[in-house]
Image (spheres, rainbow, N blue to C red):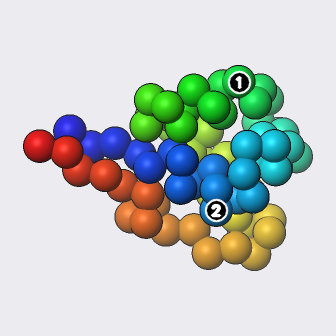
């Protein structure tokens, strides 16, 4: 199974609050509760993943999806 290390992803974007506000700044309507659920489930919608890519570009922050992939047998 392929999962996303959402905990690391959120952390790399400044934590729960900063990541949520950053996603909102790029036009992605999301709540802190939803972002927290991603961290617990190790999954997030594709649209949200794309929003992180846009946020990284806006912040001039390195973003490589492979840094956040978890492969579980």
Comes first in the chain, label 1 or label 2: 2
Q: Position of residue 35 (x, y in %)?
A: 65, 33
* Relative horizontal placement of residue 34, taking residue 32 as reference (left or right): left
Query: Where is mark 1, residue-wise?
Result: 33
Residue in view at x 64 percent, y 62 percent: 12
Q: Residues within 10 Å of mark 2 (few under 14, many from 20)?
A: some
Q: Residues within 10 Å of mark 1 (few under 14, many from 20)?
A: few
* 44 lies above or below 2: above
Query: Where is mark 2, residue-wise?
Result: 12
Residue in view at x 49 percent, y 31 percent: 40
SS at mark 2 in the image = helix
Q: Position of residue 68 (x, y in %)?
A: 43, 57
Residue in view at x 34 percent, y 42 percent: 3
**CA–CA distance in space, label 1 to label 2:** 18 Å
* 28 lies above or below 11: above
SS at mark 1 in the image = helix
Q: Position of residue 62 (x, y in %)?
A: 62, 75
Q: Position of residue 50 (x, y in %)?
A: 59, 47
């Amino acid at each position: 199974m392929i999962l996303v290390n959402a905990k690391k992803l959120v952390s790399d974007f400044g934590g729960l609050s900063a990541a949520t506000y950053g996603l909102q700044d790029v036009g992605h309507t999301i709540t802190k509760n939803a972002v927290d659920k991603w961290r617990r489930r190790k999954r997030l919608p594709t649209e949200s993943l794309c929003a992180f890519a846009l946020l990284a570009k806006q912040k001039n922050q390195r973003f490589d999806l492979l840094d956040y992939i978890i492969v579980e047998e």
